[in-house]
Amino acid sequence: MRGHRGDVLGVDERRTAPLRRAVAEGPAPLGPDTPPHQRVPAVLDALARFKLDNQSLYLVLEEAGASSPYESPSYAWWHTTPRDSLAQCTDAERAGFLAHALLAAVRADLIAHLLTVERLSVEEIRTRLAAHVHSVLPADARR
């Protein structure tokens, strides 16, 4: 199983490399110089779209191997981005929790459920995600 998890992580790293670069170094709305009220929703939307396009990979990645998906290097990397953006407009503890809560909204199993069981379209999922993100952003980040 360990080898299988390593293979899945390798595929994830290769596929997400361009998106990670855009988030780490790119221009707005994904890049690090973007204000939180623009960046956090843009990053979550990009991640949701990526998971929609790579559902099988993410269903395996989020469930494979470790006792918790929150301990994976991939999750830690994705958590850091919204957490650091949110820390610009709220305290560090709240920023960390909000980042976890927002990332829960783009879990692969939830996206699969919304598509297959609730029969939402991709656009409806993205619209509802954007509304959710906006509703939980600290007031200072909504400006």
Image (cartoon, rainbow, N blue to C red):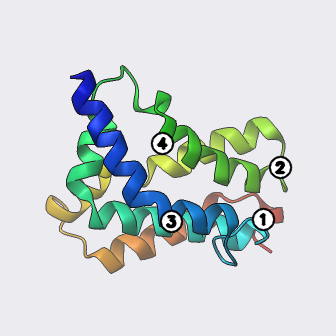
Q: How far apart, in angstroms, are the residues tagged by discs 1 and 4?
A: 25 Å
- Mark sitting on residue 19: 3
Q: Which quarter of the figure is the N terminus placed in? A: top left
Residue shown at the point (69%, 47%) measured from the top left:
83
What's under tag 3, amino acid-wise? Leu
Tag 2's secondary structure? loop
Residue 109, visible in the rendered structure: no
- Where is mark 4, residue-wise? 74
| Disc 2 and disc 1 in contact, CB within 8 angstroms | yes
Q: Which of marks 3 and 1 is in front?
A: 3
> Is 54 drawn above or below residue 128 in the view shown?
above
Determine which quarter of the picture holds residue 140.
bottom right
Determine which quarter of the picture holds residue 4.
top left
Answer few, some or many: residues within 10 Å of disc 1's Cα (few below 14, many 20 plus, some between 14 and 19). many
Q: How far apart, in angstroms, are the residues tagged by discs 2 and 3?
A: 26 Å
Residue lying farthest to the left in this orientation: 116
Answer few, some or many: residues within 10 Å of disc 3's Cα (few below 14, many 20 plus, some between 14 and 19). some
What's under tag 2, amino acid-wise? Thr
Q: How far apart, in angstroms, are the residues tagged by discs 2 and 1?
A: 8 Å
- Mark sitting on residue 141: 1
Q: In this view, does 47 lie to the left or right of 2?
A: right
Residue shown at the point (25%, 50%) measured from the top left:
57
Answer few, some or many: residues within 10 Å of disc 2's Cα (few below 14, many 20 plus, some between 14 and 19). some
Q: How far apart, in angstroms, are the residues tagged by discs 3 and 1?
A: 23 Å
Tag 1's secondary structure? helix
Q: In this view, does 83 lie to the left or right of 5?
A: right
Closer to the N terminus: mark 2 or mark 3?
3
- Mark sitting on residue 90: 2
| Disc 3 and disc 1 in contact, CB within 8 angstroms | no
Closer to the N terminus: mark 3 or mark 1?
3
